[in-house]
Image (cartoon, rainbow, N blue to C red):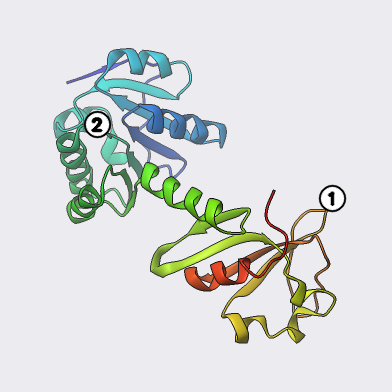
Amino acid sequence: MARWASRNAPRTSHDVNRVVVIGLGRFGGSLALELIASGFEVLGLDRDPKLVQHFADELTHAAVADTTDPDALVQLGVPDFQRAVVSIGNDMEASILTTSVIADFGIPHIWAKATSKRHRRILERVGAHHVVLPEHDMGERVAHLVTGRMLDYIEFEDDYALVKTTAPDEVLGVPLGQTSIRKRYGVTVVGIKRPGEKFTYATQESVVERHDLLVVAGRRNQVEAFANLTSTPPR
């Protein structure tokens, strides 16, 4: 069964601007609030009445529910959502069962939080389309920032990454098309930011100047090697 703690009754339309967030702990709660700030309608669900009450005035709708119970989720209109986030982190069984239930509903976009690589594999097998390991992923990101000459680092699937770094000396003062960066290092400069200016797209004619920041894309080891060419460590 489910109990509402919201000001309005839920809608039942298939609106892509609506997201159900299951689990309102630190990760799920902050994610739900960010979605609200971005203009989405959010249904927040949790077993803990205190958490639900805490977010009741912030989210579009909030309810206390056993999210492993398909009937409770049907009662709350969850099958009508196009997007769902399962952010249950401290109960692996509930996380897996909930993900399986909403996958059975045929929700086309399911994100789930995992606490380990094993947990991630199981979530993927039961129907999650996207799985994140917040602590693991953040740890890897910070490690790259600490050990390399990078200002920011984002890794995607298939060993592909984006980094923000200062410009190395060998690309200064000449158009990017004449530097042979892609041929020599296997990376592509996709953006340039001059001090006091906004980022702009990089072209073959773009000329990089000292103190410019670059956004570079490529394989992880290649972008790391390119970032390490710089003579100016990040601040």
**Above/below status of 147 relative to 15:** below
Please indicate, yes or no, whether residue 82 appears anywhere in the rendered image: no
Task: Quote the CA–CA distance across marks 1 and 2.
Answer: 44 Å
Sequence-first tag of 1 and 2: 2
> Could you say which disc has been placed on residue 232 in the image?
none
Residue 100 lies in what quarter of the image?
A: top left
> Label 2: how many residues lie within 10 Å, few (<14), some (14-19) or many (20+)?
few
Residue that appears at 54% across and 51% down: 146
Image position, residue 80 (x, y; %): 31, 40
Whether residue 232 is visible, yes or no, is: yes
Q: Is residue 39 left or right of residue 3?
A: right
Q: Classify residue 79 as left or right of residue 58.
A: left
Find residue 192 and report its horizontal and vertical position in percent: 74, 63
Q: Quadrant of the N terminus?
A: top left
Identify the secondary structure beneath mark 1.
loop
Name the residue nearer the viewer: 47 or 145: 145
| Amino acid type shown at disc 1 | Gly
Quadrant assignment, res 21: top left
Q: Quadrant of residue 78?
A: top left
**Mark linked to residue 90:** 2
Please name the residue shown 83% across and 80% down the image: 174
The x, y position of residue 84, in whole percent, is: 34, 42
The residue beneath circle 1 is 196
